[in-house]
């Protein structure tokens, strides 16, 4: 897929660069399967160094501050979900799957494990580019609600459910629905 999409990825990279300079890719630490911490890649959709300004925020506060940091091209990329395509590199390297619970920042993970003791259970599978929660709920849902959907996917995972989530994500993308239930990463 990366090879087939490479001309489009090159155009997107050029658009990000012309709109807001370097870096073109966002690189953020995430917690993966069995607690393995890895670098997740996305096309940068926010102003450079936005994560340093947004770092301590979660939920609705993070969403409103993120909107203020969005670049013109970034808003378009998020609207059609092209910002997520570089995560295919994470899939290729084995850190992520196409479908699974969305990866989360290490600091948020530590906080959530204190608030919701069973939160660590989502680490039994690789995090995904898309997930069950992302097809069912909105971004500002509670972490406990997102976890319930993640745990439902983990408990019931099958080839059929995998393809159900994949096709629901494609349908949502085609309708240009806003991102839901993600890790709220710049």
Image (cartoon, rainbow, N blue to C red):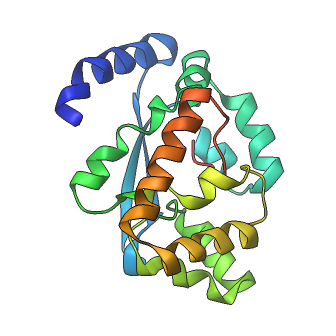
- Which residue is pictured at 72% across the width and 54% down the height? 137
Relative placement, left or right, of 12 versus 57 is: left
Q: Is residue 4 left or right of residue 80?
A: left
Task: Please state, as top left, top right, bottom left or bottom right, where the C terminus lies in the image.
Answer: top right
Residue 38, picture quadrant: bottom left
The quarter of the picture where the N terminus appears is: top left
Residue 85 appears in which quarter of the rendering?
A: top left
The extreme bottom residue here reads 117
Figure quadrant of residue 176: top right
Q: Nearer the viewer, residue 38 or 86?
A: 86
Q: Is residue 49 visible?
A: no
Figure label count:
0
Q: Confirm whether residue 70 shows in the render.
A: yes
Identified at 45% across, 30% down, the residue is 82
- The location of residue 88, given as percent across then percent down, is 31, 45
Q: Is residue 174 above or below residue 171?
A: above
Q: Looking at the picture, how far across and down is residue 170, in whole percent? A: 49, 38
Q: Is residue 113 above or below residue 135?
A: below
Q: Position of residue 53 (x, y in %)?
A: 67, 44
Task: Name which residue lies at 40% across and 29% down.
Answer: 23
Figure check: 104 above or below 129: below
Frontmost residue, 48 versus 26: 26
Q: Is residue 46 left or right of residue 15?
A: right
Q: Is residue 115 above or below residue 68?
A: below
Please identify the residue farthest to the front as the structure is shown.
Answer: 160
Where in the figure is residue 71, as x and y percent of width and height? Answer: 61, 21
- Name the residue nearer the viewer: 50 or 5: 5
């Amino acid at each position: 897929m990366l090879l087939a999409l490479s001309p489009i990825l090159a155009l997107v990279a050029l658009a990000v660069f012309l709109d807001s300079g370097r870096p073109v890719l966002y690189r953020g630490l995430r917690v993966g399967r069995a607690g393995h911490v890895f670098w997740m890649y996305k096309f940068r959709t926010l102003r450079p160094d936005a994560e340093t300004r947004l770092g301590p925020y979660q939920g609705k506060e993070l969403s409103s501050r993120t909107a203020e940091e969005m670049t013109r091209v970034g808003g378009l990329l998020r609207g059609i979900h092209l910002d997520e395509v570089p995560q295919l590199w994470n899939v290729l390297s084995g850190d992520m799957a196409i479908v699974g619970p969305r990866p989360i920042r290490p600091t948020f993970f530590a906080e959530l494990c204190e608030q919701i003791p069973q939160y660590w259970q989502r680490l039994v599978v690789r995090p995904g580019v898309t997930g069950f929660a992302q097809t069912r709920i909105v971004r500002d849902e509670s972490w406990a609600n997102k976890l319930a959907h993640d745990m439902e996917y983990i408990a019931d995972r099958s080839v059929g459910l995998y393809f159900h989530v994949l096709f629901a994500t494609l349908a949502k993308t085609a309708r240009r629905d806003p991102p839901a239930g993600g890790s709220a990463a710049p």
